[in-house]
Amino acid sequence: MHILVLNPGSTSTKLALFADDQLLMAENLSHPPAELEACGSVINQYGLRKKAVLDFLSKKNIALSSLSAVVGRGGLTKPLAGGTYQINERMLADLRSAKWGEHACNLGPILAYDLAQEAGGIPAFTVDPVVVDELDEVARISGLPELPRRSKFHALNQKAAARQAAKALARPYQELNLIVAHMGGGISVGAHKRGRVVDVNNALDGEGPMSPERSGTLPVGDLVRLCYSDRFTFQDVMRMVKGRGGLMAHLGTTDTREVQRRVEKGDEQAELVFKALAYQVAKSICALTAVFKDRPHAIVLTGGMAHSELLTSWIKERVEFLAPVLVYPGEGEMEALAQGALRVLNQEERPQIYA
């Protein structure tokens, strides 16, 4: 079965074609920033992005009629359980209105659905969107009723890595307790309890461990005093928390390869900060064992930063007493989207309905 995968980002649209779970080709279609800005809003970028996808398929002599399904990266909708969703009109209406938020990923299901219709009405899916929310009710409670904890994390990659771990352990994902740490521009650490992510930090807003560009959880009193110091605007503080926090704030870079090079050259500050990041990830992993009231079956490290053997070794030495540590470097988003569609096409999983 030939599956077309679409993943719209802020300035590009990633495209991949799979035959079952085998990648046939992949491309990153760049969109000039000036053209995107001229659209005015994300939804108005639809025509520009669709034309780029169709032009690429035409250039490669790939007919829409040859496809079995189209999958789009999930957008900002109401909170959902994890799984593969058949795209329907209700989901499309919410995405077009941006009632739950505006982001380029909103175009993923819209493009997938429209191309699937043009291909003769083949299935159109989205898989484990960023709004996946499977939190236990007790995990939602913070110290203030006005500030409940929210589930915003790297659901697609976390779920895919968890399923990969389940395969390695030769047991169904729904029977395992796993702790998965996605380490990229943001870091999310989730407790996967028998197929559900019942607790996880809000990585989008910078909660949890610090990351290459996010501050992580900060000392609350000092943060409040900083906000009211008249030294910074709201936008300044949000940039400090998301975009200019973490490694960027301490070391002036978000490139973990550059940080590792500094460490290897004897930069003591770089080593201290990089070790602190590993320390915070390890602390978050250990804290989540309380969710299971027992040791997890495995701990999974994934995301782009998992390519760093130095970083993963520092985390392992603090957590491997709990459970085996499995490392799956990289994002794997396109593969995860294709696999989610394939599970439904192969009738291994029933599609979820957006209601």
Image (cartoon, rainbow, N blue to C red):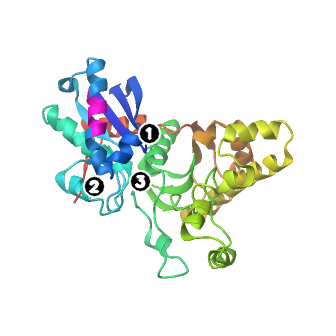
Residue 56 drawn in magenta: no
Query: SS class of the residue under badge 2?
Result: helix
* Residue wearing tag 1: 333
Q: Would you call the spot at circle 3 few (<14 residues within 10 Å), some (14-19), or many (20 or more)?
A: many
Decide if residue 252 is on the left or right side of residue 10.
right
Residue 53 drawn in magenta: yes
Q: What range of the chain is rendered magenta? A: 48-54
Question: Between 70 and 340, which is closer to the camera in this rendering?
Answer: 70
Query: SS class of the residue under badge 3?
Result: loop
Q: Would you call the spot at circle 1 few (<14 residues within 10 Å), some (14-19), or many (20 or more)?
A: some
Residue 311 percent across, percent down from the top left: 71, 43
* Residue wearing tag 3: 130
The mark lying in front, picked from 2 and 3, is 2
Residue 298 percent across, percent down from the top left: 58, 47
* Residue wearing tag 2: 95
Q: CA distance from mark 1 to mark 3?
A: 12 Å
Q: CA distance from mark 1 to mark 2?
A: 20 Å
Q: Along the polypeptide, which appears first: circle 2 or circle 3?
A: 2
The mark lying in front, picked from 1 and 2, is 2
Decide if residue 31 is on the left or right side of residue 164.
left
